[in-house]
Image: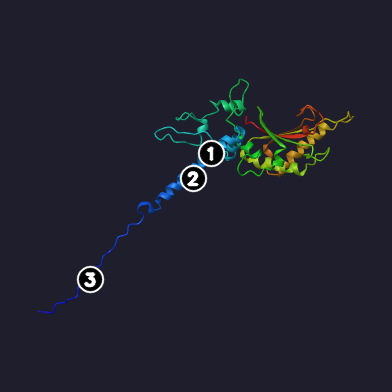
Amino acid sequence: MGAQSNAAPIIIKKKRVSGGGGHHGGAWKVAYADFVTAMMAFFMLMWLLNATTEKQRKGLADYFSPTIPVNPVSGGGDGAFGGDNMFSEKTMVMDGSGASNRNPTEAKQARGSTGVDEQGGGKGAFEDFSSLEAQLLGRSGESLVSDKMLKHIVTRVTDEGLVVELFATEDQPLFESDTDKPTQMMRALVLLVARSSDLVTNSISVEGHVRSAPVVLAHNPVWDLSTARAQSTRQLLQNKGVQPPRLDRVTGHADRELSVSNPMAVRNNRVEIIFLRNP
């Protein structure tokens, strides 16, 4: 028989350590951080609603509104799929939207964005100038319009189209005194209009207006001056990239259409660039 060993057997004990158990784990910290962040955002929202006026809130909303001229009306097809398509504005789709020129909303009617014919019905396809206005008035997020330039721009929608009024102030004229030579401010304003004009395809009209002469002159220059300034603006638009076929009309109105009651006020020196409604 072989010799027996008196050595005791070696026993190895493995201790299992469970990680992340109880309050020593870190998962609860992530959930708590999310909760605190959500509460902070909620209280900031409530503070903003209480600390701002309705006009300021509208300005904030306009700041984040998209400026890409996409069709805001959802579309749709027919058949089994009934999906959206890019021609929905001209069709009455299955989801109840589309063809807004047939059933314009009250807001668009009140703003004059739909156009009116002699019988009071809709005229042509729906035209929305909101993206163009937002670009010109510095409401878009990527806008580079300075506060100094905004003091010279007024827009309004009429039956004729979108009127962009560029006007002079006491400290900043648009043209050199009694000439049709544009100032640097006028060049910057026309450049802004020219770049923004790509948002629409409408034809353009240019109208010149001047203030009344202080004395009765044998040869009143207001007609020639207003026409020359309109022509100068037209040439600037073309130089800044507006295609000549889009320029439909250039006129001078002298001092016949005053902007303010004082006929000799500088505010009456202005140029109106009108984006005409499509016929």
Secondary structure of residue under mark 3: loop
Q: Residue at x 43, y 49 (%)?
A: 30
Q: Is residue 12 left or right of residue 24?
A: left
- Count how many numbered circles sit on residues in the image: 3
Q: Residue at x 35, y 57 (%)?
A: 19
Q: Amino acid at mark 1?
A: Leu
Q: Secondary structure at mark 1?
A: helix
- The percent position of residue 7, horizontal first and vertical second, equals 19, 75
**Circle 2 is placed at which residue position?**
37
Q: Are marks 1 and 2 in contact (CB under 8 Å)?
A: no
- Residue 212 figure quarter: top right
Residue marked by disc 1? 45
The answer to whether mark 2 and mark 3 are in CB contact below 8 A is no
Q: Position of residue 118 (x, y in %)?
A: 63, 21
First in sequence: mark 2 or mark 3? 3
User: Can the viewer see residue 70 in this picture?
Assistant: no
Say which residue label 3 marks.
Answer: 10
The residue closer to the viewer here, 170 or 126, is 170
Q: Is residue 259 left or right of residue 134?
A: right
Residue 8 percent across, percent down from the top left: 19, 73
Residue type, numbered disc 3: Ile
Label 2: few (<14), some or many (≥20) within 10 Å? few
Q: Quadrant of the C terminus?
A: top right
